């Protein structure tokens, strides 16, 4: 919108700091949780490279790292896992609420509602000293909420969580009634680590804004889920797979992408506000997606992947982001497309909770200014004179 057309008298206020639209390039606070370095396409969680964590640690270890600041030893991990597994079950009231949702509701809407209801069941809602325990509670219950919605929508019997299984294996168990091979669960587990945290992204910033008002952890998480739902953020992994299904076959991929670019269609799964020369998480996720193609025999998706990537880099110098390999990987694992973004939530709740606790520990309400570009001040004319 042309501000001069709206108000020809508008001039920027000289004593205010102006930043780019969307806060691009603005540093609004400090954090010790993660760091993205665009120049080297790197991402670290509390000092550790994310690709190393994905390859060498289970997701529970990474959750512990994000929430408590260090990697656990074996005794600390065992205690953490015992606590998480003890919280997995849903109350009868939560199950009733989830059962009442319309069958056509998006799983992200169901998850947002479920997390909000969990907050009503926690009597410690205003007790910030219990935020770590609440964070572990959400880490445990969010996969159960997703699986409950998945089974309910398919009119299948609910499968209760298995306290003997790690998070990744338990999620497959609750959704499908069986645990796949270790290669599949490792690929899924690694994806959770890659999605767990990513600095001041839109949903994390939303959570910090809500926390800055001294609202509670459940409200901040609910708001973050709402932000993550959008196709320009978490919902992109769903859009990637819809795009690949539209293409259908590798032999159609190059013509499809070139025609889409000529029509100025947005190609989902490419580009990133922070990374300019490639998302640091992509090589690791692509490796696991290729492993899924090998295991399932669904090699066409990764052939389409390679063609789309080649054309986008050659013609636009735009590289894939994490959603591009994650979409087909989840599809080959057997998950329905609308559940890709809820899986993202399973992982990112750890990062959100870490940021919520960090914001609360050194809080100042986040309240930026805006510059008014509307009409200049004018009198109100009585209705009979208009």
Image (tube, grey):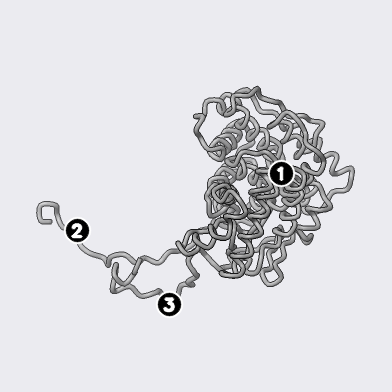
Taking the image as shown, residue 63 lies to the left or right of residue 369, namely right
Give the quarter of the figure containing the C terminus.
bottom left
In space, the residues marked 1 and 3 are separated at their CA atoms by 43 Å
Identify the secondary structure beneath mark 2. loop
Q: What x and y, as percent, mark residue 263?
A: 45, 62
Q: Residue furthest front?
A: 251
Identify the secondary structure beneath mark 3. loop
Q: Residue at x 63, y 45 (%)?
A: 345
Taking the image as shown, residue 71 lies to the left or right of residue 296, namely right
Q: Residue furthest left?
A: 384
Residues at marks 1 and 3 touching, judged by CB atoms closer than 8 Å: no
- In the image, residue 116 sits, relative to residue 246, either above or below, namely above
Q: Say whether disc 2 or disc 1 marks the residue closer to the N-terminus.
A: 1
Give the labeled residue for mark 1. Answer: 132
Mark 3 nearby-residue class (10 Å; few <14, some 14–19, many ≥20): few
Q: What x and y, as percent, mark residue 187?
A: 76, 47
- In the image, residue 283 sits, relative to residue 188, either above or below, namely below
Identify the secondary structure beneath mark 1. helix
Quarter occupied by residue 5: bottom left
Q: Residue at x 53, y 55 (%)?
A: 232
Q: Residue at x 85, y 40 (%)?
A: 78
Along the line of sight, which residue is nearer the eye, 140 or 323?
323
Give the labeled residue for mark 3. Answer: 14
Taking the image as shown, residue 222 lies to the left or right of residue 190, namely left
Taking the image as shown, residue 186 lies to the left or right of residue 100, namely right
Please count the marks in the image. 3
Give the quarter of the figure containing the N terminus.
bottom left
Label at residue 380 = 2
Q: Say whether disc 2 or disc 3 marks the residue closer to the N-terminus.
A: 3
Q: Say whether disc 1 or disc 3 marks the residue closer to the N-terminus.
A: 3
């Amino acid at each position: 919108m042309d501000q001069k057309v709206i108000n020809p008298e508008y001039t920027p206020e000289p004593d205010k700091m102006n930043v780019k639209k969307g806060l691009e390039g603005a540093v609004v606070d400090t954090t010790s949780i993660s760091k993205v370095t665009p120049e080297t396409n790197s991402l670290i969680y509390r000092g550790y490279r994310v690709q190393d964590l994905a390859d060498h640690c289970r997701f529970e270890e990474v959750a512990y790292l994000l929430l408590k600041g260090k990697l656990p030893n074996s005794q600390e991990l065992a205690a953490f896992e015992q606590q998480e597994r003890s919280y997995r079950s849903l109350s009868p009231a939560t199950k009733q609420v989830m059962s009442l949702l319309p069958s056509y509701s998006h799983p992200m809407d169901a998850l947002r509602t479920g997390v909000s209801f969990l907050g009503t069941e926690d009597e410690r809602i205003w007790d910030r000293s219990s935020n770590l325990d609440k964070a572990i509670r959400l880490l445990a219950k969010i996969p159960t909420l997703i699986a409950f919605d998945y089974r309910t929508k398919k009119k299948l019997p609910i499968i209760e969580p298995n306290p003997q299984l790690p998070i990744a294996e338990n999620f497959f168990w609750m959704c499908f009634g069986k645990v796949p091979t270790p290669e599949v669960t490792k690929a899924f587990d690694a994806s959770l680590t890659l999605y767990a945290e990513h600095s001041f992204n839109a949903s994390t910033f939303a959570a910090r804004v809500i926390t800055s008002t001294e609202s509670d952890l459940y409200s901040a998480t609910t708001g973050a889920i709402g932000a993550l739902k959008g196709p320009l953020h978490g919902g992109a992994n769903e859009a990637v797979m819809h795009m690949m299904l539209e293409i259908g076959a590798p032999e159609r991929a190059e013509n499809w992408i070139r025609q889409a670019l000529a029509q100025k269609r947005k190609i989902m799964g490419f580009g990133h506000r922070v990374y300019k020369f490639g998302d640091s998480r992509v090589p690791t996720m692509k490796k696991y997606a290729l492993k899924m193609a090998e295991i399932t025999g669904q090699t066409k998706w990764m052939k389409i992947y390679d063609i789309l990537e080649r054309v986008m880099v050659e013609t636009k110098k735009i590289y894939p982001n994490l959603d591009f390999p994650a979409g087909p990987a989840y599809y080959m694992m057997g998950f329905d497309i609308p559940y890709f973004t809820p899986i993202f939530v399973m992982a990112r709740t750890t990062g959100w909770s870490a940021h919520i606790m960090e914001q609360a520990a050194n809080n100042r309400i986040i309240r930026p200014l805006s510059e008014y570009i509307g009409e200049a001040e004018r009198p109100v004319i009585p209705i009979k004179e208009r």
